Image: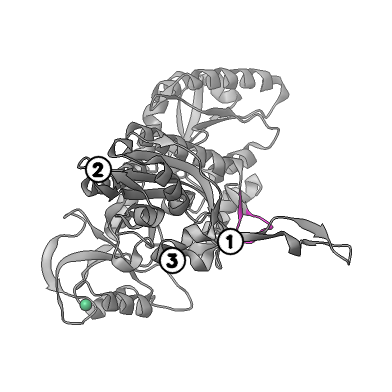
Amino acid sequence: MSEQQTKTASTAITPTRAQDFPEWYQQVVRAAELAENSDVRGCMVIKPWGYGIWENMQRGLDAMFKQTGHKNAYFPLFIPLSYLEKEAAHVEGFAKECAVVTHHRLEIGADGKMRVAPSAELAEPLVVRPTSETIIGATYAKWVQSWRDLPILINQWANVVRWEMRPRVFLRTAEFLWQEGHTAHETEAEARAETMQMLRVYETFAREFLAVPVISGEKTESERFPGAVQTLCIEAMVQDRKAIQAGTSHFLGQNFSRASGIQFLSRDNKQEFAWTTSWGVSTRLIGTVIMAHADDDGMIVPPRIAPTHVVILPVTPKPDTRDAVLAAAENLRQQLSLVKFHNESLQVELDKRDLGGGVKNWEWIKKGVPVRIELGPRDLEKNSVALSRRDKGREKEFLPANQAVERIAEILQSIQDNLFARALALREQHTRDIDSTGEFYKFFTPLNKDKPELHGGFARAHWCGSAECEAKIKDDLKVTIRCIPFSEKDAPNENGACICGCGQPSTRRVIFAKSY
Ligand SMILES: [Zn+2]
């Protein structure tokens, strides 16, 4: 897009969010150079800017996992089919999306083409891990003999594969990156406390790093992780008012320890099964951040996960001032790099590429770098710079260069806080208590089917607890119970009647929404 065009174009991304949210999302991913679809259907190439965001998410989370006593380890990519079969609900839940390795060799066939060697069939097929409870459980069974071997508190950073028929980059891909924590405990109470602790870690991480407010709660039985006794989750609202499940923490009871044989001699000298948990977040968080914060000009990266916090854009229209501007820009880069933001050095990039100033500026707007600083010959004379915050549209603030350095950490925190406040305001604006079945159906039905304009949101409504009522709502409206919130402020305890219209009473509201 040329400078002239950008002056007249209303937005850098077309369509806009209001015109076509799903297409807008794809265009932001492309324009911000976050990722692209690969030749392998459903598998994405995560580009440096997107991967840089993921690395920062990893670092933030990893530190929190270690603070809560966990260590990292690594387990195999392949899971023997017989392991997966040990837990009936688990295998049933994942069966439809498993990639399976059946052979271990290729050969040249009679037609001269490479083929899978029929003689190289594996005795037992290997499933490419969709999640690792079973293989990790088999390992823990060997590690645990006595109550003294517990707890085991381990996390794994890995990739997993769940075959996707309708992939969407970052949100739903056949292969994705994630972390999976797997812990084993001596008592039920300890395992339940761990499950809750890790959900709170995710909640804090979403709020403080991603600037995404989330509702914490418990999943209903039908939305539970296959094989879990209890699934806890954090749910975010994104800008088309749908929900995204951003992280889950599962209390697995003794289901997986029975299946894998994680047994120990207790303090009373009895053989007992361990109590286990698992918890995970994935590259889906990048999709969540895009949908929560990006605008019609592209991505907006919250400063705490930004690969680059500040980009300096030297404006060098004339050769005779070029060297002086570049020298001042380099000096500014060095000064800014000494600043700490949340105890880490600021990442500052000086974009010296020989491109038009407008082109470069727009590239960085679309990538969503939190702060852009332009510096040209006239600024040099006045010893000032032009600073633009990505969260403040196209505004520029002119300030002395030394002030930019002094204030940068505070400006970044202000961006971080503003993004959170905006996301929270959007959620509050589109969250409603609904008590009538008619109103509920209206809330979740687009006014015009051909033009699916933004509608709906979070409905806080009563539910009697029956799976039939839940299924009816899902069939009719594609609306699900996102969670039964923990906090009274997210859903007050009060008496009411089931929103489904079954006539049964309910003692508390739950969060209903359409979701990704
Ligand atoms: Zn009901």
Residue visible at 36% across and 80% down in the picture: 476
- The overriding secondary structure of the stretch rendered in magenta is loop
Label 3: which secondary element = helix
Q: From the viewer's perspective, is residue 514 above or below residue 304?
A: below
Q: Tell me the quarter of the picture where residue 415 sits.
A: top left
Measure the alpha-carbon separation of dots 3 and 2.
Answer: 32 Å
Name the disc covering residue 266, or none. Answer: 2
Task: Report how far apart the C-alphas of labels 2 and 1 lie in the structure.
Answer: 39 Å
The residue at which mark 1 appears reads as 99
Point out the residue furthest to the left here.
495
**Image coordinates for residue 90, horizontal then vertical, percent:** 42, 62
Residue placed under numbered mark 3 in the picture: 93
**Numbered range of the magenta stretch:** 37-45
Mark 1 Cα shell of 10 Å, populated few (<14), some (14-19), many (≥20): some
Q: Is residue 83 above or below residue 507?
A: above
Q: Which residue type carries mark 3?
A: Gly
Nearest to the observer: residue 13 or residue 462: 462
Instruction: Between residue 259 and residue 419, name the one nearer to us.
Output: 259
